[in-house]
Amino acid sequence: MGPVIYSLEECVRYLNQSMVISYPTEAIFGLGCDPNSKVAVTHLLSLKKRSIQKGLILIAANYDQLIPWVADEKLSYDQKSLMFSKWPGPVTWILPARSTTPYWLTGRFSTLAVRVSNHPSVINLCMAYGAPLVSTSANISSFPPCRHASEVLSHFGNDFPVCAGETGGLQRPSEIRNILTGECIR
């Protein structure tokens, strides 16, 4: 018997209940949840065995979804031009966070990692949910990320639903760049 795969509507229902889901991204399956739910983020970090200090990525269907968390007014015209030249797509930017952005997203930083995806499953999920999602690789820290729904289930069991869809086929996880320093982190 293959993995149990959940529809977009079912996954949105789980997100609304502060639960963690898994979903396909550009290269791998991600774990995601409501970024405003400390309960959901804490559960996600526990599943991954990841420190809250590291911070997390938010993934969105469009930049407007990220405005509540990102200090957009601190970005220059040139910084925005560079950022939008890579979006939508598999580039994660580290941007200044708003002072109201919860510490469970930023970790020990005053910045937040964000991505506007071009992956249809991510776009559909974020649009149906009406907000960005926490996005971190579906794996336990220090283990390789899951590229198939069956791997997610073998690593985590049925701890959360796996959303229908396939990864975008990229071999490497998204590039991570700091908009403030120009540094390429991954």
Image (spheres, grey):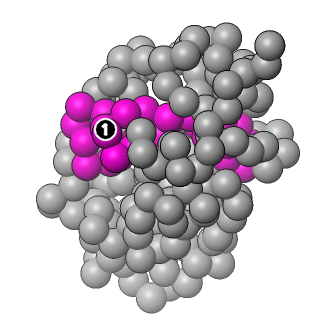
Q: Which residues are magenta?
A: 15-41
> Does the magenta segment cover residue 29?
yes
Q: Is residue 70 left or right of residue 64?
A: left
Residue labelled with disc 1: 18
Residue 134, percent from left and from top = 43, 45
Residue 146, percent from left and from top = 70, 25
Foreground residue, 101 or 168?
A: 168
Foreground residue, 54 or 169?
A: 169
Name the image quarter holding residue 29: top right
Q: Amino acid at mark 1?
A: Ser
| Residue 183 seen in the current view | no
Q: Residues within 10 Å of mark 1 (few under 14, many from 20)?
A: some
Residue 157, percent from left and from top = 57, 11
Height in image: 81 above or below 153?
A: below
Q: Residue at x 84, y 45 (%)?
A: 169
Q: Quadrant of the N terminus?
A: top right
Name the image quarter holding residue 98: bottom left
Q: Residue at x 25, y 42 (%)?
A: 37
Q: Residue at x 79, y 50 (%)?
A: 168
Q: Residue furthest bottom?
A: 77
| Mark 1 element type | loop
> Does the magenta segment cover residue 76?
no
Q: Is residue 73 left or right of residue 25?
A: left
Residue 61, percent from left and from top = 54, 66
Q: Quadrant of the C terminus?
A: top right
What is the total number of numbered labels drawn onto the structure image?
1
